[in-house]
Amino acid sequence: MANKRQLVKRRKAVRNIRKITRTMQLIATARFQAMFKRVSASKPYSEKLAEMVNGLAGLDVELPDSLLEAHSETPRDATVVITSNRGLCGGYNANVMRTAIEHIDRMANSGTPCDVQMVGKKGIQYFRFLKRAMTEVSHLGDTPKFEMVEPMANELMARFRRGEATTVHVAFMRFHSMGRQRPEVVQLLPLAPQKDAGSDSAGGDAGAGAVQYDFSPEPGKLLEELLPATVRIRLFTCFLEAAVSEQIARMVAMKAATDAAGDMIKSLTTQYNRARQTSITMELLDIIGGAAAVQ
Amino acid sequence: MAKATTFHCSVITPEREVLSAEATSVVFPAHDGEVGVLVDRAPLLFALGIGILRIDGEKGSQRFFIDGGFAQMLDNNLTILTSQALSQGEVSSAKAREALAAAEGMKITDDASWTARDKAIRRAKEQLKLAEQVG
């Protein structure tokens, strides 16, 4: 019976898809673990840097204002949006884009034009589709490297110093924990004290400001170098967190796909068995009917 | 009890912790020259330049090429934060020579490009120095 054979075919196809999605899930899990390690590996640097800045902030130093205040009267925003290069990661890119566009429109409505730097092929495709203006950045790959993010941070700081941007934001998927990632827009410049968990430990070190350090060069100059370093590491952390969130999103999406394929196989098997039973019954009825007619 | 003769030294880049070890003496390239640190050094906070970091421990010494950053000494804990730290095995004289040639070929059009060229040359030269110390 044609129906039966079709069911077998479909079941086979779904089985193959399940194999693929399960493999992708495993790959995403492995990638997630590798990325997670990188995020934890970058923590000591940012924490130590925050500690040094705090040690200096405790002193009565004349602050170099080049990164702390806007350099132009006309407001103009620069926003970096971090999306992924690959798809099949559920609502990851859609969520980031929604938050980013909300932010851009809000800025535009309040009279602040927004220059968008789009990272990742998916975001670029989406913005091209919407015909929105953006600068495309697609050379960064899937594992962000510091030496690749550094020039970008330097460029943003240079634009900020020249007054071409009065604020710099980053829209990305913040990694809170394994089970929680949220799309966020974070202000990178002008430099503001960090609000998240990092500031707790830094707050505890405020007493360290009392330590009498030997400085070289003098504290003001030192801060002039420390603050850009802080901006660089913050941007880098955003990239790392986005990459971790992407892998988690892909893991979850592929797990859901694998489960859905499993359910589908089950229902197809039931349908197939039913069809088989029906055809057997029909045949039996035919035979019995034939035998009865002969008698 | 004898007084401690070693202090803890860690080298950290944004990507990973390169080294965490006990050291007897450390010489790091500050922004304006080399600085040596021994045990019980008073707290310091220095900006680093481009150069070679030497860490002498009880089991011999280690050298790294480092590219700017900061050094902090506090309670016998020396922390070196740098954007790049390459151990002796990670630099090769051939690559450094190539980088040097590339750096010398950079065009100077304004102050920024002059500084960039200068930095690139210094980076390549210091890496070359480190690579050739092996032999």
Image (cartoon, coloured by chain):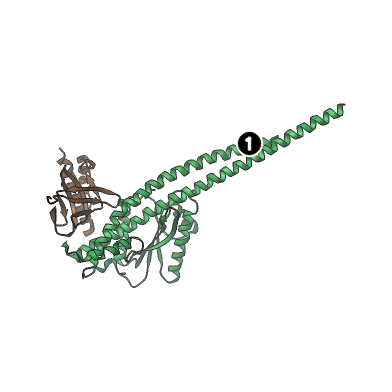
Chain colours: A green, B brown
In the image: residue A243, left or right of residue B114: right
| Residue at image location 44% in from the left, 59% down from the top | A183
Q: Which residue is mark 1?
A: A8
> From the viewer's perspective, is residue A2 above or below residue B53?
above
> From the viewer's perspective, is residue B34 above or below residue A164?
above
- Residue A202 location, x and y as percent? 29, 62
The C terminus of chain B, quarter of image: top left
Residue most extreme to the front:
B1
Examine the image and state in which quarter residue A66 appears: bottom left
- Residue A188 location, x and y as percent? 34, 63
Examine the image and state in which quarter residue A215 appears: bottom left
From where the camera sits, is residue B76 visible?
Answer: yes
Q: Disc 1 on helix, strand or loop?
A: helix
- Residue A133 location, x and y as percent? 43, 60
Q: Nearer the viewer, residue A159 or A153?
A: A153
Q: Chain of mark 1?
A: A
